[in-house]
Image: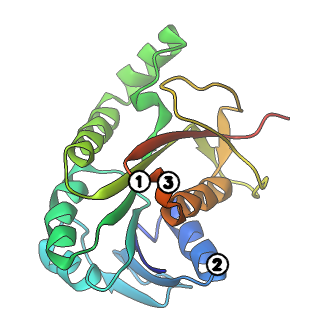
Amino acid sequence: MRLLVVGAAGRTGRLVVEQAAARGHEVTALARREVPGAHATVVGDATDPAVLGEAVPGRDAVLMAVGSSAIVRALVPVMTAAGVRRLVMTSSRSVVATRPKLLLDLVWWRFRGPYADLARAEGMLEGGPLDWSVVRATMLADGPARGRVHTDFEADATGGDWRLTRADYAATLLDVAEDSAMVRRAVGVGGPRG
């Protein structure tokens, strides 16, 4: 697959690039600086339509390793014009979760700006023309991959650990991008139990 990774220089994005290349994908990175391991890097701002116009055409899928309504707003028309339909966006499980209520109220109070922006970005995708998937993570942590995750399609987690390694999350983002059954679906991801 010819894959564009937006936010490829970040802690999760670098792992997506590395794992995608290891899976045999042709990886183009979009970041503010060169990204080692990518076949090519487009350096620039992911909200700039001119930069996106250089990076998107010819891709089979776009994977956003950073969630942002400003990026979605700029990306959707460029992808539509280029005939690139598949988009996978990272998000947070807390955007839709309802329990534990007290903890979520505190988390939302602390991160209300970023979570509101993720909710806006998800809404823009849901009402748009692309073959989108949203992958909502629990708390991301650095560390080695455990090789498995817990996934579900509910607002509240049905199991799993609240800690999820970035390496396992990167693998899940790629799994979702490769799976046509995940089109127009949002999936929650947590670490494995035990």
Q: Which residue lies at the image location 53% right of the left edge and 23% below the top edge?
A: 156
Horizontal side, residue 16 vs residue 98: left or right: right
Q: Which residue lies at the image location 39% right of the left edge and 71% below the top edge?
A: 61
Query: Of the residues shown, which amino acid type is indicated by label 2?
Result: Arg
Determine whether 38 is above or below 83 in the image.
below
Residue furthest right as drawn: 194
Looking at the rendered image, the disc whose residue lies closer to the viewer, 1 or 2, is: 1
Between the C-alphas of marks 1 and 2, the distance is: 21 Å
Query: Of the residues shown, which amino acid type is indicated by label 1?
Result: Val
Residue 37 place in picture, x, y as percent: 56, 85
- The residue indicated by pointer 1 is 183
Between the C-alphas of marks 3 and 1, the distance is: 6 Å
Kindly check if marks 3 and 1 are in contact, taking CB atoms under 8 A apart as contact. yes
- The residue indicated by pointer 2 is 23
Q: Is residue 6 visible?
A: no
Mark 1 or mark 2, which has the lower sequence index? Answer: 2
Q: Can residue 74 be seen in this view?
A: yes
Q: Is mark 1 on a helix, strand or loop?
A: loop
